[in-house]
Image (tube, coloured by chain):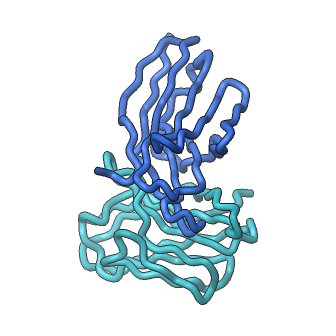
Chain colours: A blue, B cyan
Amino acid sequence: RKEVEQDPGPFNVPEGATVAFNCTYSNSASQSFFWYRQDCRKEPKLLMSVYSSGNEDGRFTAQLNRASQYISLLIRDSKLSDSATYLCAVDLTGGGNKLTFGTGTQLKVEL
Amino acid sequence: DADVTQTPRNRITKTGKRIMLECSQTKGHDRMYWYRQDPGLGLRLIYYSFDVKDINKGEISDGYSVSRQAQAKFSLSLESAIPNQTALYFCATSEGGGRETQYFGPGTRLLVL
């Protein structure tokens, strides 16, 4: 089992749809959690941090489920420009040492 | 100007050659990282450094070495390049001290023939 696991997709959704991705992690002691966006062959860019209480930024909502050891990303009212790969990142050490990245979930938003 | 820069952006080399990838940052962060990305395998950590005197191996350090010349500079070397080191390489930085968000450079595309 991978330490940080994501469904690779692709998720093909129509414009305006709501789509959700999950990311499971192996260590219950994990602390920091993040969602990154990566466009084709470009660098990952921070989309949002994931807090215990959940957080929202416009159309994007991130949540943490410690009991089931996963984080989620919800995108509402999808835009064509949301098409990208979404990477989750987790500090599995729980000590702020380094992040382990998932392999990413590809999203394609279509007309 | 970009906060994290990498040079070169693209490189083609031959098997057995030694090459160096460089990373510079103006964010003032103490922590720096080198990753490689391969299709289907995601980002894998090669080396990381928490300060100039602290260098640590990541999950795939074999065949690579690093040098932290200053707080702002972290170089990755391939001592004798081989074709399976063909990949996209990213440098990243983080502030540390509980602030673990990582910021990435634009990447270096390396092709080993």
Quadrant occupied by the N terminus of chain B = bottom right
Which residue is rendered at x = 58% and y = 56% of the image? Answer: A31
Which residue is rendered at x = 51% and y = 27% of the image? Answer: A83
Please give left or right for residue A41 compared with residue A17 in the image.
Answer: left
- Relative to residue B110, is residue A11 depicted above or below? above
Give the residue at the far front of this rendering: A67
State which quadrant residue B93 falls in.
Answer: bottom right
Quadrant occupied by the C terminus of chain B = bottom left
Which residue is rendered at x = 37% and y = 54% of the image? Answer: A3
Pinpoint residue A16: horizontal percent, then vertical percent: 58, 11
Pinpoint residue B108: horizontal percent, then vertical percent: 47, 60
Give the residue at the far bottom of this rendering: B53
- Relative to residue B15, is residue B111 depicted above or below? above
Seen from the viewer's position, the closer of residues B14 and B68 is B68
Which residue is rendered at x = 68% and y = 80% of the image? Answer: B71
Seen from the viewer's position, the closer of residues B25 and A100 is A100
Pinpoint residue B86: horizontal percent, then vertical percent: 31, 61
Pinpoint residue A11: horizontal percent, then vertical percent: 41, 24
Residue B10 seen in this snapshot: no
State which quadrant residue B111 falls in.
Answer: bottom left
Seen from the viewer's position, the closer of residues A101 and B81 is A101
